[in-house]
Image (cartoon, helix red, strand yellow):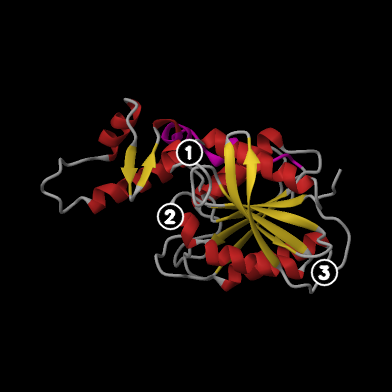
């Protein structure tokens, strides 16, 4: 069984980025493997929801390069129905995304092993649920970037994008988030920003709260949030989650980064301090110099 942080020295080897399709129970998913010779282990990146996934790609690439400096490869997945994976977005389901994590971890365990899950936004919610329900004995660590704490609240904000986009359309009936949820409850998908959301995916996201999925008590965990003027780190919502996790025996290190909200901005945006803090945390946990 692979240890979460196998012993070894950092490497200066160049990264080789290898794209391929990984077979999963529900269909093939597209992955990018940031690999290097004699890797100590790997980080599995679980991306965010919809367009946020694309906005985070530059940050993920830079973070993979930083992980390589510590001797860790990175595997980035496009969950089924998203990105370049098989299926359309209307085929996407929360359960299949959880299966995708399991398939990726299994693939890594046949190599140097999965040392860390890096979950971004809703990806943190997915990663935490997978760890809560199916974590292997090797116990990957968890890094949560700007985690979504309440799936229903997040999905409501997402639905409002459609309302805003149609605000000036006098030829269309006025919609509310309630009317769109009624449409979903009746079994009809809703399209928002070019993404067709299946009722089953909407129902799953509505039912998810991060507080319900504390990782196993011995899971090394980093919680990383943006510092906002007048705000606190963690946020009030994050504090409630972390209190629940602490009661379950999870000791989480909380860090705040000063930088852009890269998951929100349409143009390429970076937050170098988030990468620095994440890399320093893994360096300390892995015992590299």
Mark yes or no: residue 129 visible: no
First in sequence: mark 3 vs mark 2: 3
Q: Residue at x 68, y 45 (%)?
A: 104
Q: Which residues are magenta?
A: 201-217
Q: x and y percent of residue 277 in the render?
A: 65, 67
Q: Nearer the viewer, residue 44 or 286?
A: 44
Q: x and y percent of residue 243 in the render?
A: 61, 44
Q: Residue at x 81, y 39 (%)?
A: 137
Assess disc 2: are there few (<14), some (14-19) or many (≥20) residues with their C-alpha within 10 Å of its C-alpha. Answer: some
Distance Cα–Cα, label 3 vs label 2: 34 Å
- In magenta stretch: residue 114: no
Q: Residue at x 75, y 70 (%)?
A: 69
Give the quarter of the figure containing the C terminus.
bottom right
First in sequence: mark 1 vs mark 3: 3
Residue extending farthest left: 170
Q: Residue at x 48, y 41 (%)?
A: 87
Secondary structure under tag 2 reads helix
Q: Which mark is on residue 92?
A: 1
Q: Identify the residue under disc 2.
A: 51
Mark yes or no: residue 37 visible: yes
Task: Identify whether 272 is placed above or below 201.
Answer: below
Q: Nearer the viewer, residue 127 or 267?
A: 267
């Amino acid at each position: 069984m692979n240890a979460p942080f196998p012993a070894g020295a950092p490497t200066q080897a160049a990264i080789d980025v290898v794209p391929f399709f990984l077979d999963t129970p529900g269909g093939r998913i597209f992955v990018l493997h940031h690999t290097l010779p004699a890797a100590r282990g790997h980080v599995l990146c679980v991306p965010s929801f919809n367009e946020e996934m694309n906005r985070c790609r530059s940050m993920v690439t830079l973070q993979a390069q930083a992980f390589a400096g510590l001797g860790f490869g990175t595997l980035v997945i496009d969950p089924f129905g998203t990105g370049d994976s098989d299926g359309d977005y209307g085929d996407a389901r929360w359960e299949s995304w959880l299966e995708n994590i399991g398939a990726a971890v299994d693939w890594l365990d046949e190599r140097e092993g999965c040392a860390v899950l890096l979950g971004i936004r809703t990806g943190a919610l997915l990663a935490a649920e997978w760890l809560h329900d199916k974590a292997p004995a090797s116990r990957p660590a968890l890094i949560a970037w700007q985690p979504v704490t309440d799936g229903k609240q997040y999905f409501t904000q997402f639905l409002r994008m459609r309302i805003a986009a149609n605000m000036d359309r006098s030829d269309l009936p006025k919609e509310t988030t309630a009317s769109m949820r009624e449409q979903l409850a009746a079994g009809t998908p809703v399209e928002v920003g070019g993404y067709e959301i299946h009722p089953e995916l909407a129902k799953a996201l509505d039912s998810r709260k991060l507080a319900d999925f504390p990782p196993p008590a011995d899971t090394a965990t980093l919680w990383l949030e943006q510092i906002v003027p007048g705000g606190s780190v963690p946020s009030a919502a994050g504090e409630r989650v972390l209190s629940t996790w602490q009661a379950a025996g999870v000791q989480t290190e909380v860090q705040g980064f000063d930088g852009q909200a890269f998951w929100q901005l349409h143009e390429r945006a970076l937050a170098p301090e988030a990468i620095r803090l994440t890399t320093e945390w893994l360096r300390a946990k892995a015992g590299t110099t």
